[in-house]
Amino acid sequence: MPIGHGAIPHDLVHLATEAGLGLNYGFWGLLAQGATFRRGTNQRRTRPCRAMIAAHRSELNQAEALGNAHHHAWQRAQPTALCTTFDHLAQLWAAVPDGGTLTVEWPSLHATIASQQTQHTSQNARKPRPRIPRTN
């Protein structure tokens, strides 16, 4: 996990950055529009998905750079438009029990925490959402 002011996973930083800044063509925005990537998804990359990524490569790179810049500023307790969001997500992340999950909806950032015991019932009752498992 990152060190410094708060600690949230890299992917969660970028989810929050893209949603918070309204970036529709970063990793999470493209994923929501049906794109698949070599890593991070369990779906095969298709020609239309590769074309979508290629068409938005500049925005994808910009979203990555913005996420990193905001995260680095937040870690150093410097002002950033995403400070409140990162603080909130860091509190949620810290509250996830070992073996539990933090489920964050795109693009609302509505989040729920589930322990290992409740995952099985809630997983069957809802549509799948990106999950970041907590590991120590």
Image (cartoon, rainbow, N blue to C red):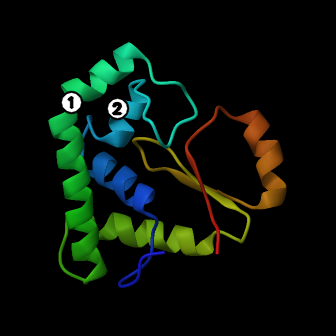
Q: Secondary structure at mark 1?
A: loop
In percent of width and height, residue 114 lies at 71, 58
In percent of width and height, residue 36 lies at 44, 29
Of residues 76 and 136, the one drawn nearer to the viewer in this rendering = 136
Say which residue appears at 35% left-offset and 64% top-offset: 85
In percent of width and height, residue 71 lies at 28, 68
Q: Which mark is residue 88?
A: none
Q: Is 74 on the left-hand or right-hand side of 36?
A: left
Of residues 127 and 48, the one drawn nearer to the viewer in this rendering = 48
Say which residue appears at 69% left-offset and 35% top-offset: 126
Q: How many marks?
A: 2
- Quadrant assignment, res 67: bottom left
Of residues 65 and 102, the one drawn nearer to the viewer in this rendering = 65
Amino acid on which the number 2 mark rests in the picture: Leu
93 to 45, vertically: above or below? below
12 to 41, vertically: above or below? below
Amino acid on which the number 1 mark rests in the picture: His
Residue under circle 2? 30
Label 2 near label 1: C-beta < 8 Å?
yes
Say which residue appears at 65% left-offset and 58% top-offset: 101
Q: Secondary structure at mark 2?
A: helix
Dot 1 or dot 2: first in sequence order is: 2
In percent of width and height, residue 87 lies at 39, 73
What is the crowding at mark 2: few (fewer than 14 residues within 10 Å), some, or many (at least 20)? some
What is the crowding at mark 1: few (fewer than 14 residues within 10 Å), some, or many (at least 20)? some
Looking at the image, which residue sits at the far top? 48
Residue under circle 1? 56
Quarter occupied by the C terminus: bottom right
Say which residue appears at 34% left-offset and 36% top-offset: 29
Label 1, label 2: how far apart the Cα atoms are: 9 Å
